[in-house]
Image (cartoon, rainbow, N blue to C red):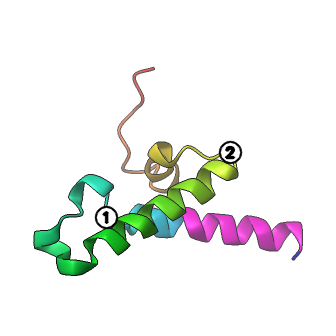
Amino acid sequence: MTEEDKQTALEALKIAFTYMPKAIEVNKYEYGERYQLVLNHVETVREALLIHGIDPDEVDGEVNADIAPNSTY
């Protein structure tokens, strides 16, 4: 995999993560018996982002910079 391919895959992962539910939103009422699997998937993607030096909590603002609030720090 070339460096360009890796960057494209990482960008796709960041975009997909912005559409994933937040862990706090995942519950048995919304997801039924699959809620734990969904939580595991969310955590797996968070870990992959962290491994690549990307803060998962900042991804949405990076991907959607045009609608993200201004940072206060």
Question: In the rendered image, which quarter contains the C terminus?
Answer: top left
Dominant SS of magenta comes to: helix
Amino acid type, label 1: Pro
Looking at this view, name the residue that lies furthest to the right. Answer: 2
CB within 8 Å, label 1 to label 2? no
- Give the quarter of the image for residue 39: bottom left
Establish if 53 lies above or below 70: below
Point out residue 43 in the picture as x, y percentages from the top left corner.
Answer: 46, 59
Q: Determine the residue positioned at 32% across, 57% down.
A: 22
Q: Is residue 46 left or right of residue 26?
A: right
In the image, taking residue 9 as reference, residue 3 lies left or right, namely: right
Within 10 Å of disc 1 (Cα), the crowding (few <14, some 14-19, many 20+) is: few
Q: Is residue 65 above or below residue 73?
A: below
User: Which residue is painted at 36% across and 74% down in the image?
Assistant: 37
Q: Residue 57, position in %: x, y? A: 45, 44
Q: Secondary structure at mark 2?
A: loop
- The answer to which of 49 and 65 lies nearer the viewer is 49
* Nearest the eye: 8 or 27: 27
Residue drawn at x 24%, y 63% as measured from the top left: 26
Q: Secondary structure at mark 1?
A: loop
Dot 2 surroundings within 10 Å: few (below 14), some, or many (20 or more)?
Answer: few
Residue that label 2 marks: 53
